[in-house]
Image (cartoon, rainbow, N blue to C red):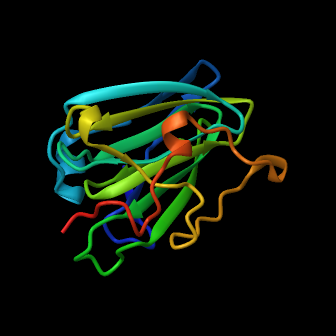
Amino acid sequence: MRFIDTEIEDVKIVEVNVFGDRRGFFMETFRADEFMAKTGSRPFVQDNHSKSAKGILRGLHYQQEHTQGKLVRVISGAVFDVAVDMRKSSPTFGKAVGEVLSAENNRQLWVPEGFAHGFYVMTDSAEFVYKCTDYYHPESEVSVRWDDADICIAWPLVDGELPQLSGKDKQGLSFKDAPKFS
């Protein structure tokens, strides 16, 4: 595994070695010892899997309590994946970093606790899997507007069309109004 720095020091791209031949491939997608040494993360307690159609945008989400670090990857299709620093004491507070994750590039993104997270589906569909450091706690979930001008994310919208959003994401808070971490 290779851990690659992004513009936000705590957010990492994780590249894995893929061994393949005419029969197929093998890749090790996670190793606790290497991952903990590079990120200092808590152990993962929950795995999630979602499938979405082209043009769906999920996020930007985080939990105020039971905060979750997430190791995310795509097993089918491609997404533009985004992490936004919600930690007031951080030198990168309010900054966003985005990466294309796909079944072809096998890249993963480590999104630490204290970050809002979201993704936009760029292909006909995408299957997205991720590990979490805490359990889902819907009572403390916050949704920040995907198009907030203070964050200014350059989403690669397909044909320039607005994304499809869930009801809670349509009601997302502005970055200014969203609760922050200390």
**Percent x, y for residue 27?**
44, 33
22 to the left or right of 128: right
Observer-nearest residue: 22 or 77?
Answer: 77
- Looking at the image, which residue is at 44% across and 57% down? 83
Report the label total: 0
**Percent x, y for residue 89?**
22, 77
- Looking at the image, which residue is at 65% across and 33% down? 77
As drawn, 90 above or below 177? below
- Looking at the image, which residue is at 55% across and 64% down? 148
69 to the left or right of 182: right
Look at the image and tell me whether residue 28 can be seen.
Answer: no
**Residue most toward the right?**
159
Residue 181 image-quadrant placement: bottom left
**Percent x, y for residue 31?**
25, 39
- Looking at the image, which residue is at 24% across and 49% down? 35
Observer-nearest residue: 118 or 128?
Answer: 118
**Residue most toward the top?**
23
Observer-nearest residue: 27 or 40?
Answer: 40
104 to the left or right of 27: right
Residue 24 image-quadrant placement: top right
As drawn, 9 above or below 37? below
160 to the left or right of 125: right
**Residue most toward the bottom?**
91
Say which quadrant the C terminus sits in: bottom left
Observer-nearest residue: 17 or 157?
Answer: 157
Look at the image and tell me whether residue 94 can be seen.
Answer: yes
